[in-house]
Amino acid sequence: MGFWKKLFKDGSEEERVDYYQEGLELLKVGKYHEAVTSFRLALRETPADAAILQQIAIAYTRIGMTDEAIRTYRSVLQKDAQAAGAHYGLAFLLLREGQAAEAADHLRAFLAAPPPGAEAQQHIEHAQRTLAELTGGAPAGGSD
């Protein structure tokens, strides 16, 4: 996409490629490896951007690169300890790895400050149900 445009442009116009947006579009169509490449190019423009790193972690998860996804989510949380999406994604990866106690901590952190909006509601409910299963209690609050 943007990479190819840059490679074959005639040089008469200065076209700036939005690699982050390109990566999001590639994620939507299931081109996860290509999305990682675009996100890495976006990181060159804004190093250590937590939003870009979070998208890389999502792509790694979809590719099946669980260890890399976990490391990347942890890196996001080092930069932004309140990153709800990183807490959510990391929690479910840790559950797959059998680390239920740490996963529960990340679910609690997610539910303490969940993202706003109707789109987030299904993730909030999923986190509440999962935390309730892990703790043997009623679904956790965090959204009203």
Image (spheres, helix red, strand yellow):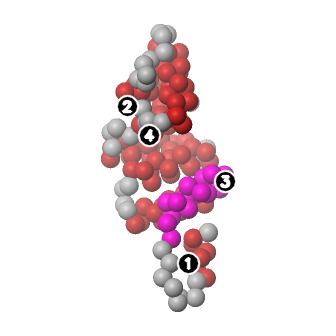
- Coordinates of residue 95 in the picture (x, y in percent): 52, 28
Q: Which of the two residues, 10 or 38, is positioned nearer the viewer here?
A: 10
Cα distance in 3D space between marks 1 and 3: 21 Å
Classed neighbour count for the residue bearing mark 1: other residues with Cα under 10 Å, few (<14), some (14–19), many (≥20):
some
| In this rendering, the label closer to the viewer, 4 or 3 | 3
Q: Is residue 80 above or below residue 23?
A: above
The numbered mark at residue 113 is 2
Magenta stretch, residue numbers: 17-31
Q: Pointers 4 and 3 in contact (CB under 8 A)?
A: no
Query: Looking at the picture, which amino acid does disc 2 mark?
Result: Ala
Question: How far is mark 1 from mark 4, CA to CA?
Answer: 32 Å
Instruction: Identify the secondary structure beneath mark 2.
Output: loop
Disc 3: which residue = 29
The circle on residue 86 is 4
Residue 106 position in % (x across, y down): 41, 29
Q: Amino acid at mark 1?
A: Lys
- Magenta segment includes 62: no
The amino acid marked with disc number 3 is: Val
Q: Position of residue 103 (x, y in %)?
A: 46, 27
